[in-house]
Image: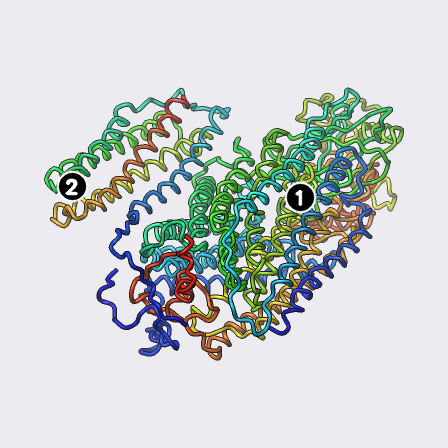
Amino acid sequence: MATVPLQHGNRDTEWKLPARGTVAMASLITAESSIFTIFVVAYLYYLGTDVQGPHPKDVLEVPWFYSACLLSSSFFIWLAEHAIDRAKMAAFRLWWAVTILLGLIFLYGTAVEWHKLIVEDHLTISTNLFGTTYYSLVGLHASHVVVGLLMMLFVMIFSLMGAVGPQHAYRVKTLALYWHFVDAVWVVVFTVVYVVGR
Amino acid sequence: MRAQQNSTIFLCRSIAVPALLAFSTAVAHASLPGSIFAPHSTPAHEEHQLSIFVLWITLLIYLGVSGLLVYALVRFRARPNDDAEPPQVFGSLQIELSWTIIPILIIVVLFLGTARVLFSVQDAKKPPTALDVLVIGHQFWWEFRYPQYNVVAANELHVPTSSNSAPRPTFMKLTSADVMHSFWVPQLNGKTDLLPNRVNEMWIDPQTPGMYVGQCAQFCGPQHAKMLLRVYVDTPEDFDKWIKNQQRTQAELAAPHIAMASIPNPGNQTRGPLPPNSPATHGTVAAVSTEAPDNAVNAHNGQLVFERQACINCHAVGGTVANGRYGPDLTHLMSRDTLGAGAAANTPGNLLAWIADPNTFKPGCLMPAMHLSERQNAQITAYLLTLK
Amino acid sequence: MADQSLPAGQGIQAGHGSETALDRTSAHGTYLELVHSWIVTVDHKKLGIMYIAYALVFLLVAGAEAMLIRIQLIKPHNDFLSPYSFNRMFTMHGTTMVFLVGMPILFGFGNYLVPLMIGARDMAFPRLNAFSFWVSAFAGLLLYYSFIGGVGLSGTGSAPDIAWFAYAPLTEKAFSPGHTTDYWAIAILANGIGSIGTAINIIATVFCMRCKGMTLMRIPLLPWLYATMSFLVLVAVSPLTACQAMLLIDRYLGGHFFDTQAGGSAILWAHFFWIFGHPEVYVLVLPAFAFANEIIPVFSRKAIFGYPAMVAASVGIGFISLGVWAHHMFTIGMTSFGNAFFTLSTMLVSIPTGIKTFNWLATIWGGKVRFETPMLFSVAFLFQWVIAGLTGIMLSVSAWNWQLHNSYFVVAHFHYVLVGAIVFMIFAALYYWYPKMTGRMLDERLGKWHFWLMVIGFHVTFDTMHFPGLLGMPRQIYTYEPDRGWNSLNFIVSVGGFIQAIAILIFVYNLIHSYFRGEDAGPDPWDAWTLEWATASPPPVYNFAIEPEVASRRPLWDRKHPEDPDSAFE
């Protein structure tokens, strides 16, 4: 057997590959998108098929304020990404904290809405098809918000402990990608549940 | 590498021999009841013709491709003492294009052939002379309702023959009372699933009288295997006779003065309420205590037992208090050839054993053993034997 | 990736002999330490072997279940199994074979081979890799725990008895009151999470871990197909995971997704399941194609014919397969337009599939074919794959499908795909890469026995199995009437099944025997061309002492034939 090594001349040419974190997060987002698609399809499929109420148009109120909070958090996390890129760690912490706060406000909004639906409108997950599909879809999204918030909280704690530096910009951005996805999904869920569904 | 010359030949043989064996067995059986190659109704016939067309095309493709493969493997096998590498060829755009375009053409042909049959069978117009049947699937039996005749039957579907001169196809609506089932009588048509909350449609127009077998083709629980199905294709005269008999309630048979009988029916086909306290529904206790071996008495007592036990929660006998809908309608049980959706032949002995414990024939069926005394079982049997 | 600190001198030619990771681990310490080292490992090769071992164990289990099924069906009105047991057996057989044999064994090969073939030292996310494996393993154990812990349909069963596609509403509380359906749903859910994790890992590995010079068009076909397969896992297994969540919401929280008594829909489950179920077939078959893409060229001594066409066809199969799911539902009552659409889309899959088949043929054409065991299995695969594809075309003919659907013809067809194509290629792959994994060759004589018994058993079983279907025999029935003409056919099918069982036992013996007594393999026993053969057998933990650099698709060809390198043509 020949023993020519597997090396070739032009060793200086730059060999660039995509970042694995970004590719993996994009893959995860692909998978999550199909999960959300299935729940959205189920919601639309059963829309208006309930014989017994409560029906969406009777009980649902459009959560303009809370939606605005969540969607604007995408902007603030972008500011945070921008800041860590420029090694401005104080600004990064500020925008990161604002993002977390906005996410928490959104979750609070969901909790308030659910409380009203359950206590006042007597709509639970087992009441009718609307209840089943609504709580599943909105709950699935809310659970993603919770996961995102937990991860951002870890980053926040590490950052306050001084363990997050500009060298982690890439990881922070990967996490931010997830948060952007959670926001984008809310646009879909919002459209389906509160615009089309009412 | 010595034996490898023969390897390919053995390979082909080992593929061909069992295939041929099985194929010849199958050809010998092709005209069996239940074969999709022995159609007796227009949809089945069209599906059969399409299948022959597709089989020929695929057979030709197979012979072509596998022939090339065999040739290549034999022709280009490694020879002993030849260690030089063959010339390396990396591809050819023309060749790639040719084996892309030719399959596309074949697919166009196959698709057009399929579409013709698909639309002609599925979108066939229903003629005004058609017979309507509502098929309801249950775990693990079939309910057949004839809305035009107010008849409810079970497990054995009777339909008239249809001919070109006097077309009388049967148009079925199919639904399910519980889980998914599928209606399949291969000689008459392909499958159509029965789903809860949904009505599907299919049609048949059998030309030859006879009995056609089929069974449930969608897994539906423990006794999916014994959810058998029979379609009796009758001459128009026989069919009318059968319908006439089915239309009579047992009240009319036993006590002709009760004109009003009831087949409670969610399909808006009720014929009026059952008169309360009618003689047909309430016997006297004295009759039960008589030990006479007389069949009529036995049958009468059997009816009392039947009506006082849980039997009537599930079973209906037209013209009596029995109006359960969970199990098969027993009004004309004796007009059927089988028990338990084909699980057993309908003989008095089997009937007795079935009542004592249905699980002996059909373990997992939803009818429980009622744990009655032997005498009570015999009485119920005697009663059911009168339901002609 | 601490490439600087690796021991020098162990170049890519390292490893004459088998002083290797496997042996080194066992060389020191107790068995307990050995077990511990496997449990805590994040090495892609160890995880790959664990995947394969785990799948082989379940292959034997599910094979035994198949044998019980065939004993029950050997004659009409047999009472070897009760209907309950029979339903459990085919449910567990199907579920196990797809989720606990097919997926793990293919992921195992992917884990083992993808980093080696692209010249990487590990997967992109080694710890995620270990996590995915253990989640999948947990899923398998959970599913089989149901034999002890569950109660099934009508409250009488133990293992799940709802068929592997678990059609609603049979799985709802009203019809499946016990817990076996919950075991099934949670096991599939957990398995899905493991699969998605591995898929993400494989995609990230293929695209982000390639060695220097390995551009997209120089990636060997196996990693390419694994990336496609992983993409399919992302978009197809996720819906399955989602609908298991819906089923569990129904069963535990009183939801109504598939609760037909409260207005839910049985069709929705069918759609969701087959949106997973059909691409799943390609998830399983793409790796089988991948093995063929590596093995057929090496044993024909020719480069793969039409590499770009092969890549395009594989990716094309992946995309088209996402639009064909409802061909499992031609009898469910779709409109004629819907039936026509899915007829056409299904037929379209045969075009890229045909391209692949013809490219393999063209690869053999003009070569010098060596019929060692891996190639024998690959050749059988080619013939069987053609038949499986053609019966697939028959099934796509919707108007004929009304007859064929849910009959034994379908069972024969998908076993032709799953056994005739996938299992045969898995055997080929094991014979081909076992030397790489263990440093020892599998025994050729036993391999020939295994092959011929397998081929004969396979054809006796599955050729014959088409015919009862044509004669009206539906699938999933625990017994049948003697007057339908199915008796002798079923007898032949059962006999064929036992022949296959013997073949598999020979194979298992070969695996164990050769591990201890096998001929020494050396780094490159087949005179092959891809990077995994450039390192020792088995490879060291770090795979390559010096990260390789490539200039063509066949770096080892270039090395062995400096006078005629591929890189001159690319």
The quarter of the rendered structure image containing the N terminus of chain C is: bottom left
Estimate the x, y position of residue B7 in percent, counting from the top left. Answer: 65, 67
Q: Which residue is mark 2?
A: A84
Q: B184 or C208, which lies in front? A: C208
Is C278 on the left or on the right of B303, as rendered?
A: left
> Crowding at label 2, few (<14), some or many (≥20) Cα neighbours within 10 Å?
many
* Of residues A85 and B320, the one drawn nearer to the viewer in this rendering: A85
Residue B138 coordinates in the image, percent (x, y): 66, 39
> Badge 1 sits on which subunit?
C
Left or right? Give the position of C361 relative to B42. Answer: left
- In-front residue for pair C162/C518: C518
Identify the residue at image location x=68%, y=35%. B114
Question: Mark 1 = which residue?
Answer: C394
Answer above or below: position of C279 versus A191.
below
Q: Residue at x 25, y 68 (%)?
A: C6
Residue A98 position in % (x across, y down): 17, 34
> Can residue B251 be seen at all in this image of the molecule?
no
For disc 1, the neighbor class at 10 Å (few under 14, some 14 to 19, many from 20) is: many
Q: Amino acid at mark 2?
A: Ile
Residue C469 visible within the image = yes
Helix, strand, or loop for circle 2? helix
Q: Position of residue B52 (x, y in %)?
A: 75, 42
In this view, the residue farthest toward the front is C563
Marks 1 and 2 in Cβ contact (< 8 Å)? no
Where A113 falls versus C154 (above or below)? above
Looking at the image, residue B278 lies above or below residue A25: above
Q: Amino acid at mark 1?
A: Met
Observer-nearest of B330 and A45: A45
- Cα distance in 3D space between marks 1 and 2: 59 Å
Residue C542, placed above or below residue C252: below
- Left or right, C108 with reference to B285: left
